[in-house]
Amino acid sequence: MAPAAYGLAFSAFMEKAAGRSDDDAMTPQREDELLRGMLAHQVGIEPDRAAAVLDLAAVGVVNNAWRNGPVEDWHAGDGPLNDGDMLRINAHTSWRIRQIIRRWRYEVGLPADADAGQLDDVSVDDWDWLAVRVWRWLVKPQRLLPGGFRLIEIAGDDLADYNEHVPGTLGAWATTAEKRGGRYAAWRAATHGGLACRHWWGTPSWPDLVHAFVTVLDEPSHRHWGPERQWRRGLRQEPVQVQDRSGLRKLLLRSPWLLDQPAAQWVVAAGIGHLLPPMAPLHASTDIGGGASRPG
């Protein structure tokens, strides 16, 4: 299953569960158990650590508010953004939103070792304020994107549609925190980020993905390149930043938005996202009711 398909499967599964008959409907407790199980056994983070959950929630928020909207049109077809641009921009945006959320966590009095349950004690006003801060940064027309372009230059005539999409998704996140509690809202966003964006910087799977990718670059017979190495032969000459394997590994792990355009595009063309290991099954102890044990 493609990385994004995990997120779609998760969303579809949760919606289907919510629409069951009264006898089979997923209760809030069962839904919490499902999210906890996904985070622990499939995503690979400790669900009770607020800092870890919020860091990954940043990726889920970016995927919903930035990536899954008008930006897709800027990337598809003859749009101004290519795959390498998206790698750099998605990573940088995730990093920036993570920083905003970390400062917010500090301001509301949650230390790095806080229990995720304490997110339920954060006021509705504070959750609303977080959504506003993320919104302000995402829609800033003069925001400089990796590559040197500003948001308004990339968006063009679609800026209004983008400005309508972003507050809608962030408002829904804040509303979820109000109705179901901060822990649930953070768990839900983190699970989405961990499933739909397994091939993104900022997720638990990214470091292993980087190590696997850099390793196969020097293994021409690896199955990643196809039975006759056709994929490897079809690539352009390695850009300078790719030739420096140690430097490439460090950039990909720490700050892939600092890759130059040729290197970023080459990395995506070389199939970094195709080296993800299979998704781990949901632990058998996760009871979600209705006889199902995993989405999809």
Image (spheres, grey):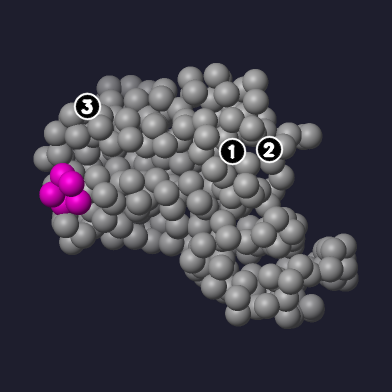
Instruction: Report the amino acid beneath label 1.
Output: Arg
The circle on residue 179 is: 3
Please tell me which residue lies in front, 134 or 148. Answer: 148
Q: How many marks?
A: 3
Dot placed on the residue nearer the N-terminal end, 1 or 3 = 1
Magenta highlight range: 106-110
Mark 1–mark 2 Cα distance, whole angstroms, equals 15 Å
Please tell me which residue lies in front, 285 or 38. Answer: 38
Mark 3–mark 2 Cα distance, whole angstroms, equals 35 Å
Instruction: Report the amino acid beneath label 2.
Output: His
For mark 1, what is the residue?
150
Q: Residue 134: x, y in percent?
A: 37, 37
Label 2 element class: helix
Label 1 element class: loop
Instruction: Report the amino acid beneath label 3.
Output: Lys
Please tell me which residue lies in front, 199 or 78. Answer: 78
Query: Residue at (56%, 68%) from the top-left corner?
Result: 251
Q: Going by the image, does 27 lie left or right of 248? A: left
Label 3 element class: helix
Secondary structure, magenta segment, majority class? loop
